[in-house]
Image (cartoon, grey):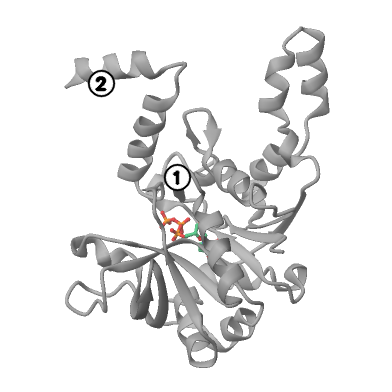
Amino acid sequence: MIKKAVLPVAGFGTRFLPASKATPKEMLPIIDKPLVQYAVEEAINIGINEIIFITSPEKYSIKKHFDKNQDFEDRLRSSGKDEMVERLNPGIFTDVKFHYVNQNDQNGLGHAILQAEDIVDGDSFAVLLPDDLFFSEKSCLSQLLDLYKRVDASVIAVNKIDKDNIHKYGVIKPGSIDNNVINIEDIVEKPNKVDAPSDIAVCGRYIFKSSIFNFLKSTGFDKSGEIQLTDAIKILLKHEEVYAAVYTGEKFDCGSKQGFVHATIALALRDKSISNDIEKIIKEII
Ligand code: UTP
């Protein structure tokens, strides 16, 4: 029943300069797959069939990546490399519609999501921030969808964060908690350690009722000129119930260099084609 997903990918990626100067941060690979593809696959695997990228003209390589490349496919087939075709043009992309909407000014995550309003067209929709990479038997978005189906309200994925790092995240004030489901009372963006209402932080997966667009519009720009998604959720909470699902599984913050390298090592160690070599290399280094 959730058929549309919004993926904001228009940010500058300054933490990854100079790599992100000509290559979008979202196209940097974890082993052999661009970061953004992990999020796209997570969305498609719960039944989403419209992916709405909020992007910018400089990031044309994202579109190129998700377009079918028939010429290359024909070459692979004629040289007997049929097994590579699935890696080039994955079958799960076939019936998916990819939209690309430019965010002309990078005025924050809330502003980015607002650009999707026309295409979302009144439906409930998922938001995935590709920087956050999740590994679990049941995907983070799938766990969130289970909760959405139960409560029929906007839902947010959250996880516990070490208090020393809490200032980097949106943090919720929990109301009642029942078996990993939290009724959210309040939310604050990047609080300092002493003011944080809890150690439960928002991670990059959401399912919203389309009413969020009204609140994104009424939020307005903050003093740094951005529309903050957290601020819009704060207003949403005054009108509607919003729930959080505590994500169970592994999470890597690939928007930071440490998280990106951590994800690369973790995935390399579980990729059977290279894991023995990588383990040996790591042992040698240590
Ligand atoms: P971040 O602030 O983490 O990413 O935004 P960034 O701005 O690209 O990275 P740094 O901080 O400069 O290194 C979270 C997500 O929101 C998108 C980003 O692309 C990222 O996926 N975003 C952010 C937008 O699409 N538009 C914006 O105006 C801001």
For the image, the number of numbered tags is 2
Q: Categorize mark 1 by other alpha carbons within 10 Å: few (<14), some (14-19), many (20+).
A: few
Q: Is residue 260 left or right of residue 216?
A: left
Q: Is residue 27 left or right of residue 96?
A: left
Q: Give the residue at mark 2.
A: 282
Residue 92 spot, x, y in % from top left:
72, 39
Give the quarter of the image for residue 99. bottom right
Give the quarter of the image for residue 191. bottom left
Residue 59 spot, x, y in % from top left:
62, 48
Ligand 1 within 8 Å, label 1 CB: no
Q: Categorize mark 2 by other alpha carbons within 10 Å: few (<14), some (14-19), many (20+).
A: few
Q: Give the residue at mark 1.
A: 136
Residue 161 spot, x, y in % from top left:
27, 61
Residue 170 spot, x, y in % from top left:
37, 70
- Helix, strand or loop at label 1? It is loop
Pick whichever, 280 or 22, lies toward us.
280
19 above or below 104? above
Kind of residue indicated by mark 1: Ser
181 above or below 59? below
Kind of residue indicated by mark 2: Ile
Pick whichever, 257 or 184, lies toward us.
184
In percent of the image, x 66 and y 77: which residue is there? 210
